[in-house]
Amino acid sequence: MNDLRHLLSSLVKAALMGDDHASVRWREEARRDHARIMADPAAVQSLKIDGMWTLAVADAEAPEFREAEGQVGFGFPALCPFTLPEITDPDFDIDAGVERIRKSASTG
């Protein structure tokens, strides 16, 4: 799995988790993913973020995570709620990103 897909998947998992400890764990994973992207941002520039989003949502909705989920009701948008420049910005805020996903999932 590439770093962009893994970052998006970690953000979705953090947004989904009903347990705060699990959400914190996925936020930390997202921070590590983002740091890897920042080490080589050119590696993700040719990727299609909406395609990565679709794959990341599928990863996060895997059966092994369903029991721990519970924060939001699903109705994820088909398009990624972030642009590639936003997600590759060195100042990208993981916590704000999780909240944006929660809001987009809540409203569809």
Image: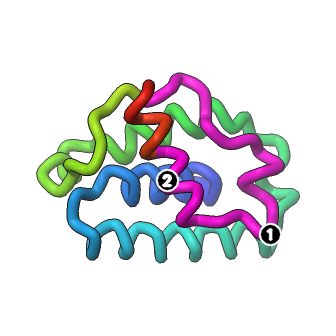
Residue 52 lies in the magenta-colored region: no
Quadrant in the rendering for residue 24: bottom left
The quadrant of the picture occupied by the C terminus is top left
Q: Which residue bears the numbered disc 1?
A: 90
Quadrant in the rendering for residue 94: bottom right
Q: Residue at x 80, y 57 (%)?
A: 43
The image's mark for residue 99 is 2
Q: Residue at x 50, y 26 (%)?
A: 77
Q: Position of residue 39 (x, y in %)?
A: 79, 75
The answer to whether residue 74 is above or below residue 10 is above
Q: Residue at x 12, y 51 (%)?
A: 67
Q: Which residues are magenta?
A: 76-101
Q: CA distance from mark 2 to mark 1?
A: 18 Å
Q: Residue at x 62, y 59 (%)?
A: 3
Q: Position of residue 19 (x, y in %)?
A: 22, 65
Instruction: Give the left or right position of residue 61, taking residue 5 as reference.
Output: left
Instruction: Give the left or right position of residue 108, taking residue 96 as reference.
Output: left
Residue 84 lies in the magenta-colored region: yes
Q: Nearer the viewer, residue 90 or 51?
A: 90
Q: Earlier in the sequence, mark 2 or mark 1?
A: 1
Question: Do the numbered discs 2 and 1 sit on residues whose CB atoms are within 8 Å?
Answer: no
Instruction: Give the left or right position of residue 43, taking residue 55 as reference.
Output: right
What kind of residue is marked 2? Glu
Which residue appears farthest toward the left when viewing the image? 67
